[in-house]
Image: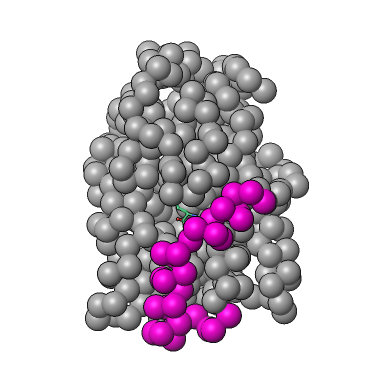
Amino acid sequence: MSDLPEFIKSLYEKYRFLDDGSLASYIPELTKADPNWFAISIVTKEGEIFEVGDSQEHFTIQSISKVFVYGMALEDCDRQTLLEKIGVEPTGDPFNSVIRLDENSKRPDNPMVNAGAIATAGLIKGVNATDKLNRLLSMFRRYIGHDVFIDAPVFMSERATGHRNRALANLLLNFGIIGDNIEEILDLYFQQCSLIVNCHDLAVMAATLANRGINPITKQQAVKPCYIRDILSVMHTCGMYNYAGEWAYRVGIPAKSGVSGGIMAVIPDKAGIAVFSPLIDRRGNSIRGIKVFEDLSDQFNLHLFDSPLEKCSFLDISQSSQESMVIGNR
Ligand code: GLU
């Protein structure tokens, strides 16, 4: 079966009752999510939309934001300056690990673990905290294509309970990676994590990365094309927490997940795919999300190292007769 709309419908039915995993609880507000929420969204670089389930349900973007803020820091600082402060090595450690920072390099291993993401937030330019937040929101607006908002209760919840992130920020200050405006930097980091999105938005954001930084719906340039390579590389090697290696092996698509249950993946030059289901495994990845991506990758030979001859052209939508499809709760 190679028909995309039928296939994502079948994946939705196959996994909608899979209830392994649990809601993220270390950020208290996230326990308010409904474990039944489930959506799959695909947006092609031509702007076609295929989605099923709760694609309009709101949730906070959490760690997926790290990808986009990294792109902004690249634009603000340039590649070399950024590399001196934040590496690009996968850690194999959990996202919130403190230990790695303290080793030889004295810099966070990569921008997808919390230490690296907080360092990245510290590099965003602006004359004051409000200016930095406004610049960040404008950047997200370009990717999403409509107005964006921060979830205030989630932000407050993260800020009140983020002791570990505060410890990371202090270590970063100790190593001279960030300045002493720790609370301002942490606020920006908590705000980026508390951005409200839905599964459809995530697919549009991923499709923008697939389309050399141009939002396929609004046609607005969200990030300079020269940095797409950097962004996709760190997604590919570090985007799925300490499951990144196995993900690269099994699924083989650059992706990023967040503890609120989103997974966003980029098929370069083709499409963005997002899955949302808030039940996560112990590493922080959506369980239904992983299953859906494994099946999609297998079915359509999406793995980066599948032979080009075997690659199914389901995403070359413009050449086929498939029409955009939305099923479910819009
Ligand atoms: N705001 C969360 C934290 O810093 C993000 C975690 C995530 O999605 O991995 O812990």
Q: Quadrant of residue 249?
A: top left
Q: Please state, as top left, top right, bottom left or bottom right, where the N terminus lies in the image.
A: top left
Q: Quadrant of residue 124?
A: bottom right
Q: Nearer the viewer, residue 259 or 236?
A: 259
| Residue 24 on image: x %, y % | 43, 42
Taking 125 as reference, is 60 above or below it? above
Q: What colour-coding does the image apply?
A: one colour
* Residue 324 percent coordinates (x, y): 61, 22
Q: Main secondary structure of the magenta part?
A: helix
Give percent across and percent down for residue 37.
52, 26
Give the residue displayed 55% in from the left and 59% down from the top.
160
Whether residue 51 is visible here, answered yes or no, is no
Q: Is residue 190 above or below residue 264?
A: below
Image quarter of residue 126: bottom right
In the image, 132 versus 234, the foreground residue is 132
Is 157 inside the magenta-drawn segment?
yes
On the rendered structure, is 49 left or right of 96? right
In the rendered image, residue 292, in percent from the top left (x then y), is placed at 38, 28
| Magenta residue span | 152-181
Q: Residue at x 39, y 84 (%)?
A: 175
Residue 261 placement, left or right of 132: left
Task: Tell me the quadrant of the picture where the C terminus can be found.
Answer: top right
Q: Is residue 157 above or below residue 186?
A: above
Residue drawn at point x = 24 percent, y = 44 percent: 246
* Residue at x-position 43% and y-position 14%: 13
Residue 241 in view of the camera: yes
For the image, the number of numbered tags is 0
Q: Is residue 299 magenta?
A: no
- Please indicate whether residue 53 sits to the left or right of residue 150 in the image: left
